[in-house]
Image (spheres, rainbow, N blue to C red):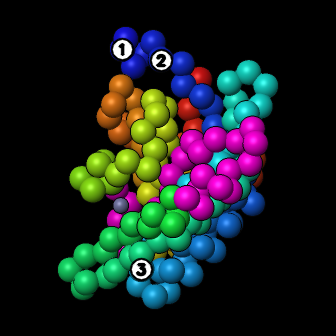
Amino acid sequence: MTSATVRQLTLRIGPDVLHAAEAFLTDRGADGLEAAGLVAFRARSGCDSIAETLIAPDQVADNTGLGCWVQVTERGKRELAARLQAGCRYLARIHSHPGRAFHSPADDANPALTHEGAISIVVPYFGLGLRRGLGVCAVYRLTAGRWMPTQPRADGNDWVIGSG
Ligand SMILES: [Zn+2]
């Protein structure tokens, strides 16, 4: 099956979830640390899903001066499983970078989300980039096993990923 034949969900993210993400990422960023969370979505009519909440699980991060890393702990993984509400699914990962937003080889290899169509959002400047919305973030969609760049579009105060 080629990527063109895969029906991709259209995902909508509203300002509440983005503000929660910005608050969490910049709080860690104030200590010079990257941070990561998963966004739980609730299915809507058809193939549309809407972001319901950001879950920021237990995680460890370090800034060595040469580079930054963040990793969800085993406790964090259990937390993610326990806090997912009925009818919701984790469809997007969001994490911060100290500077430019891009998918690093470590990000490519991160197994947090592995399903076809999963979204990965990289926020620049320790989360501050979210003040400009998703348009300045690097957004990727797992398509036929590869993280492919995708451009979200603004729709009022929401951001929409994927045209379906
Ligand atoms: Zn990264």
Secondary structure at badge 3 equals loop
Which residue position is annotated with label 3? 33
In 3D space, how far apart are the residues under numbered discs 1 and 2 (Cα atoms)?
7 Å
In 3D space, how far apart are the residues under numbered discs 3 and 2 (Cα atoms)?
36 Å
Could you tell me the amino acid type at mark 1?
Thr
Give the numbered dot on residue 48: none
- Give the answer, above or below, for where 50 lies relative to 24: above
Which residue position is annotated with label 1? 2
- Specify whether residue 50 is in view: no
Q: Quadrant of residue 55?
A: bottom right
* Front residue of this view, candidates 77 and 114: 77
Count of labels in the image:
3
Image location (x, y in percent) of residue 16: 75, 60
Residue positioned 44% across, 67% down in the render: 73
Residue bounds of the magenta highlight: 78-104
- Give the answer, above or below, for where 112 lies relative to 43: below
Residue 91 magenta-drawn? yes
Image location (x, y in percent) of residue 161: 58, 38
Q: With 163 as the anchor, is 125 left or right in this view?
A: left
